[in-house]
Amino acid sequence: MPTSTTFYRKLVDTHTVSRIDDQNVLLYVDLHLMNEYTSPQAFSGVRAKNRHVRRPHQQLAVVSHIIPTHAESPRVIRDSASLLLADNLARNCDEAGIRLFAANNLLQGIEHIIAPELGLIRPGMVVLCGDSHTTTYGALGALGFGIGTSEVEHVLATQTLVYRVAQTMRITIDGALPYGTSSKDLIIWIISQIGAQGARGYAVEFAGSTVAALSAEARMTLCNMTVEAGARAALIAPDQVTFDYVRAHATSLDDAAWQTALTDWAQLRSDEGATFDAEHHFDASEIAPYVTWGTSPDQAMRVDELVPDAASQVTPEAAAALQRALKYIDLESHRPIAGTPIDRVFIGSCTNGRIEDLRIVAEIVRGRKVAQGVRAMIVPGSGSVRRQAEAEGIAHILKSAGFEWREPGCSMCLAMNDDFLQAGERCASTTNRNFEGRQGRGGRTHLMSPAMAAAAALTGKITDVRTLESFHV
C-alpha cells in the first residue's frame, strides 16, 4: 500500500534534484526573488568564481527596503548608502539580464506583495528570497522560505539549493472568526499560544474550517507571520479560493494550460492518514483582537485584558524576559493595555499592505478624523495596490481622515529608510516584528490588525475595535 504523504513532502520530493543524505537534498528552485540589501555580496561571489546567473528568467528583483516612501515624483533616494545598494542591484540585474522593479517602476513594491499580484506564485512551486517572510507564498500552495546571502549566490549560479528537510507540523483551527477579528489576530494569537520558538525547525501546514474561510490575501498574512514562531515554511493546501486568486492574476495562462494546471494542483494536499511530527488544534471562538505588549511577537494579549506579570510566566527565563520587555516598552503589569496612548500609526508592510487591508481601514475611518497629535501613515504594498486604492476612492477616504498617503515600500516596518520612530515614540503597527529598535532606535511597537490600528489612529490610544460599533467594522 502506498505511503501517505504530507503536502510539504510532496513539494520537496517533486523538486529534489538529488538526495545528498538522509536529511539533505539538492532542491530545484522555480522562482528566486531578490531585494537590494541581501543580494550584492551574492552577485560579487558569482563573479569572483567566474560564473554566471544560470537562469535569469527565473529571477526577479525589487527595490523595497531602503526606498523612501514620501510623495515625490520621480522618487529620489538621497541617502548615499541606500542609493549605492539600489545602484548596485540595478547594475547586477542589467549585467545578468534579470527583471528589476526599481524605484520609479509602476509595478515597484514589496516582493511578497508584487509576486502574487503579478501571477508569479502558483501552487506547487518552490520560491526563495533573501528575506524571512518568504513564507507568505504558502498561502497559494507554494513552498516559500527565506535564505541567506551565501545561499542566494548558490541559487543564482545553479538554480538549486542544498536544503535540509524540515520536520512537519499541522495546525488546525476550526470555527468562525469572532466579530472584530481577522487573520492578523489569528496568527498573533497562535504565536502567543505556541511561543516564538514553538514551530522552530518545522514546516507548518494550516488546516481547518477557519483557514478555509479566509480570503487568499488573509491567508498571506497568516503564512507571512508564521516565521515569527520559528517556522521554516508555512503551507495551505490549494482550494477554490487559491484557484480563483491565481486565475485572476496569472493572466498568461490560456484555457488549456489552466485546465492542465488544475489537474496537477488537485494532488497538492496531504494524503488521508499522513502523519505529522507535531500537531496543534485550536478553536477560533477563543480568538479576540490581539495586541503585543512586549518586544517579541509572542508577547501578546487580548486587548481587553491586563498586562501580565512575572508571576504568570512558566519559567524564570520567561519572567526575566517579561521584565526586560516591559521596561523597554514602558508598560506596567496589572494595568489595561487598552487606553495606552500612542504617537504613531503605521499601516502597511508585507504583512498587511494589500488592498483588502486598506479597504478595512477605510471602512472604519470613513467620515472620521485621526486623533489630534497622532501621526498616521498608510503605505501601500505595491504600485498596483496604490492605484487600485485610488481608483476605489479608498485613498480619498484615508487622506480626508488625516492619514499620510505614501508611495509603496517596506517603509517603517524595519526603519532601513527615512520612515522610523523617534526614541520613546509608541506606534500601533500592522507589521510583523516588535523587536527593540525594529522601527527606530528606542521606538516602541505594538503589533495589531489593520482594524485595530485604524481604531488607535482615531482615538489616539490602543483601543478595542469592537467598541467602535458605530464605525461598522
Image: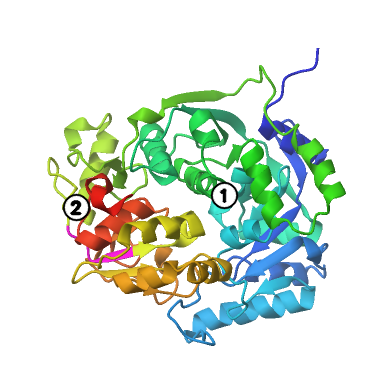
Pointer 1 residue: 136
Q: How many marks?
A: 2
Magenta stretch: helix, strand or loop mostly: loop
Where is residue 22? Give x, y as percent: 73, 30
Residue at horizontal 28%, vertical 30%?
315
Residue at horizontal 50%, vertical 45%?
227
In this rendering, the answer to whether 26 lies above or below 411 is: above
Q: Quadrant of residue 260?
A: top right
Pointer 2 residue: 327
Where is residue 433? Give x, y as percent: 40, 54
Looking at this view, is 218 or 48 the one in front?
218
* Numbered badge on residue 206: none
Task: Give the residues drawn in magenta, as a range.
Answer: 341-345
- Residue 238 seen anywhere in this rendered image of the structure: no
Looking at this view, is 226 or 21 the one in front?
226
Q: Earlier in the sequence, mark 2 or mark 1?
A: 1
Looking at this view, is 265 or 93 the one in front?
265
Q: Secondary structure at mark 2?
A: helix
Dot 2 amino acid type? Lys
Crowd tier of the residue under label 1, counting other residues whose Cα lies within 10 Å: few below 14, some 14–19, many 20 or above: many
Where is residue 116? Give x, y as percent: 64, 56
- Residue 153 seen anywhere in this rendered image of the structure: yes
Q: Secondary structure at mark 1?
A: helix
Indicate left or right for 166 with 257 as reference. Answer: left
